Amino acid sequence: MSRFHPRAVHVLAVSTATFLVMATIWWSKADAEAAAQNFSPATLESPTTALDPATSSGSAVAPRILRPIEPPKATAAQEQALASEVRRLVSKARGGPGPLQGTEIAVSIRACDDGPGPGRELLEINGDRPLLPASNMKLISTGAALHVLGPEFSFETRIRGVRDTFIVIGDGDPSLADPVFFSALAYQDADGTQHELDEESILGFWADAIVEAAPPDGRVTLLVDDSIFESRLWNDGTNGVDGWNPHDRLRGFSAEVTGLNFHRNTIHFRPTTSGSTRPNWDDMRPRLDSMLQAAQNESQISKKVQTAWILRSPESDLLTFKGEVKPPKQGQRIAPLEVTVHDPAMQFLRVLADRVTSRGVTVERIGRTADGRTAGGTDVGPVVRMPLGPIIEHCNETSQNLYAESLLKRSVHAMTGRPGSWADADASIERIAAKRLGDAAPSLTKDIRIEDGSGLSRRNLMTTEFLTAWLDSFHDDPKLSEVFVESLARGGEEGTLKSRFTELRGSSIRVDAKTGFMTGVSCLSGFVTSEDGRRWSFSVFCNGFKGTSNSAKRLQDAIVMAIADHIE
């Protein structure tokens, strides 16, 4: 189990000053005292205990190599043999006959030498050719966040009270109420019963605090300040037609991006088939009755197939339930159906207003402001702080697009002082590369183009020689090397590489890398590390193939295994 893995066990702790989970939730003193009444002091754990990976149980992954990294020590003849073998593999794949015949293939391999500047490039095949990187873009957005924000950075989401107005101030945190972290957020109540924290718990904390701080007439205004990011929430390209695929707009991996994200900016439904002639869609999370009541149910019950889906027009949250719902087998848990929401920050505000209203306080108005950070007032309820490390790791290991976009925009905001935007991303990455790559930066960055942080855009362009140099710069960085390398999926053991490089399980060779896939594109970039700490960075791009990505993956795996054989 990796250091920040969301399935690791963490204990929620309470004291008169703090309420601690994997994401740290801080109360003001008065709120903390009220919260402490509901929890037993016997459940207290220190922050170190809660976050220390050594205390997590059930670990199935060997410890990371933490010894100092040494430069590769291969002879010139060994390096030449590696280059020859990789060229043979690429020539055979492109020369066909086979699925990769005529495919654009680019390869770069570097020895991660200690010292300033990019390591020695042992091999490049079309290394300077700009190609589509797909999700290998996440190596750029996560690396940029570490470089700009620093490994000690935490996102902070808070509510400020100014008389009868309560302002939710977003910080761009992509993980707020993400269900993937729910099992890691646990607490014990005064009776010793353990509970998992979920989206309703977080909403409840804030709703209770607003009700407590409401004026005597019980009337409040709720505003959201998500101005840390631009108002452009979905990447429709420079002219509205060449951005993200519009057919993916309702799918969870293509959610809108805002300065206040909640529940991955999606709604989860678990339709049931009991007691009705039509499927029942009442299990909605986060629940909003007004939205559910306005929805149209055109779905059917089927004993044979499960084809249920949810329709939403791009610029509204009016839902239509479609398709057929099949009853689950006895004891089978119903997997949620996911649909994205439009304008996630305002959707969150509507849900919060609903919870406040249900507690007897009248919400007279909800709206948006860009002045929350300068409005004064005091914190009301908890301040939710999520450290950067778990977000970086979850982004890279499981290829989370919303996380990558939020990290890129948050980095751009920190660099420019303006709302984080896709338009400023290219220049921002170029500035970071200049600092990390030194004199080599101009030639390595001249043909790259950054259109987003996740790789969903087909306007992104990247070269393999830039990517291996970028990777090597993090290997060389004593402050960032460990957290960056550990954020990547490990071959044969976790994340998107769990089923690849299984032959390396238990061996002295490790592969830590990021995959990337979209129609006609397959990429793999990362590190190969030996037991004695020698390390190589590699990048393999395949663009323009037809059909599945299986042949491209086989070529990538063969090249990585050639590096592993070269090490031994």
Image: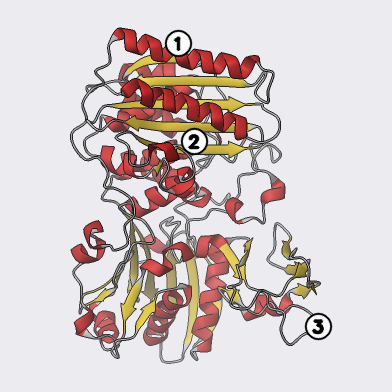
* Nearer the camera: disc 2 or disc 1: 1
Q: Tag 2: residue type? A: Asn
Q: Position of residue 522 (x, y in %)?
A: 57, 33
To which residue does mark 1 refer?
Answer: 84
The residue indicated by pointer 2 is 136
Q: Is residue 270 left or right of residue 221?
A: right
Residue ID for mark 3: 277
Dot 3 and dot 1 residues touching (CB under 8 Å): no
- The residue that appears at 36% across and 45% down in the rendered structure is 487
Q: Which amino acid is tagged 3?
A: Thr
Instruction: Name the image quarter holding the C terminus.
Output: top left
Q: Which mark is residue 402?
A: none
Q: Secondary structure at mark 3?
A: loop
Q: Is residue 514 above or below residue 372?
A: above
Query: Is tag 3's residue or tag 1's residue first in the polypeptide sequence?
Result: 1
- Left or right? Give the position of 399 relative to 477: right
Dot 1, how many residues are within 10 Å of its Cα: few (below 14), some (14-19), or many (20+)? few
Amino acid beneath label 1: Ser
Give the Cα distance between marks 2 and 1: 26 Å
Give how far across and how far down residue 11 sits, in percent. Answer: 28, 71
Rendered location of residue 104, percent (x, y)? 61, 20
Taking the spot 79% from the left edge, 72% from the top edge, the residue there is 302
Front in this rendered view, residue 566 or 438 = 566
Q: Secondary structure at mark 1?
A: helix
Nearer-N-terminus badge (2/1): 1
